[in-house]
Image (cartoon, grey):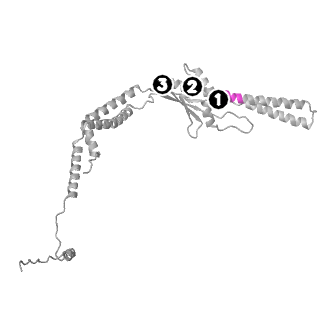
């Protein structure tokens, strides 16, 4: 006899879950409530945005100007330690590390604008930090650019002084003296132009306002996640409960039918074969007749003489 199998079909799984439907429903409700509870305790974060334009630095050499700005470089400068320290000095209870961890810089495509995204625990703090960073960036950029201009004018001043010393040693009216004086005058004009050129590094065109909504996902997201996990865990729990309570009627019926089929197959296999008779003229019967000895009649013995 074949051994009885213990396999589950989709019907068995469905019936097993339905037998313990109350477990499934209870787990779904429980996980939905847990999702709502997680939403209540989920920390709220607020992100404020401030926009700062980036203008070309200045005219540093005669006949050329910086009409464009390397925005990738400015993006790195905006989160440099110098900018963060300047911004932290304008804020209360704010560290450089906190600003660096909660600040991202974005550069819109084909633009010379920096967007400061700053995240904080409160709307007001997020706006204050975003504005402080944008202002600190503008001030730091102005400081760096002015330092470049000052350094350039000082270098020009040294070159002018050296040429003037050369001019004083040349004879009056000589061609060398006239050529050197022209060089000195050219450097003086360049120095005056750089010093007098107005410098504009950019401006905070869109100050950050306290955001109205937090970054926390909607409560529906948490409840939906709870429902999904509840269905998954609840189905498993319902199957376990049904398994502990005993196999379903469908499973027992399937096992009985399988056993009956195995027994029927065994009976058909072991069924005896009835007797049969060969025809008289069959070759087998002819051979057997040839091999069988023929019995001869026995004579009776005579008595007396």
Helix, strand or loop: magenta stretch:
helix
The answer to whether residue 253 is left or right of residue 143 is left
Q: Is residue 111 left or right of residue 62?
A: left
**Location of residue 168 by image quarter:** top right
Residue 143 lies in magenta, yes or no?
Answer: yes
Residue 87 badge:
none
Q: CA distance from mark 3 to mark 2?
A: 19 Å
Whether residue 119 is situated above or below residue 62 in the rendered picture: above
Q: List the single residue furthest toward the right.
A: 171
SS class, disc 2: helix
Check residue 68 for magenta coloring.
no
Residue 141: mark in rendering: 1
Q: Position of residue 305 (x, y in %)?
A: 6, 80
Foreground: 239 or 192? Answer: 239
Q: Which residues are magenta?
A: 140-148
User: What whole-number distance in Å separates the C-alpha atoms at marks 3 and 1?
Assistant: 27 Å
Tell me the residue that label 3 is attached to: 123
Q: Mark 1 and mark 3 in contact (Cβ < 8 Å)?
A: no
Residue 97 circle label = 2
């Amino acid at each position: 006899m074949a051994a009885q199998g213990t396999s589950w079909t989709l019907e068995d799984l469905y019936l097993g879950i339905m037998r313990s439907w109350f477990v499934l429903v209870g787990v779904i409700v429980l996980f939905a409530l847990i999702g709502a509870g997680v939403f209540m305790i989920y920390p709220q974060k607020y992100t404020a945005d401030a926009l700062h334009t980036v203008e070309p630095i200045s005219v540093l050499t005669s006949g050329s100007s910086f009409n464009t700005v390397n925005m990738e470089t400015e993006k790195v400068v905006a989160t440099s330690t110098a900018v963060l320290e300047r911004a932290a000095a304008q804020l209360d209870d704010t560290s450089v590390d906190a600003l660096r961890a909660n600040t991202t810089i974005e550069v819109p495509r084909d633009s010379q604008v920096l967007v400061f995204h700053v995240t904080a625990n409160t709307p007001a703090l997020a706006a204050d930090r975003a504005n402080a960073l944008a202002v600190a960036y503008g001030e730091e950029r102005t400081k760096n650019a002015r330092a470049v201009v000052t350094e350039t004018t000082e270098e020009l001043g040294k070159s002018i002084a050296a040429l003037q010393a050369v001019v004083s040693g040349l004879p009056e009216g000589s061609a060398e003296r006239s050529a050197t004086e022209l060089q000195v005058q050219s450097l003086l004009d360049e120095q005056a132009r750089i010093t007098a050129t107005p410098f504009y590094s950019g401006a905070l065109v869109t100050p950050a306002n306290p955001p109205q909504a937090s970054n926390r996902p909607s409560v529906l997201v948490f409840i939906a996640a709870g429902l999904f996990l509840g269905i998954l865990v609840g189905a498993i729990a319902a199957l376990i409960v049904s398994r502990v309570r005993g196999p379903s009627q469908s499973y027992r019926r399937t096992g009985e039918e399988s056993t009956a089929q195995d027994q029927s197959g065994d009976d058909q296999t072991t069924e005896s074969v009835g007797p049969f008779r060969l025809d008289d003229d069959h070759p087998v019967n002819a051979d057997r007749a040839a091999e069988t000895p023929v019995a001869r009649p026995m004579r009776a013995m005579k008595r007396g003489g």
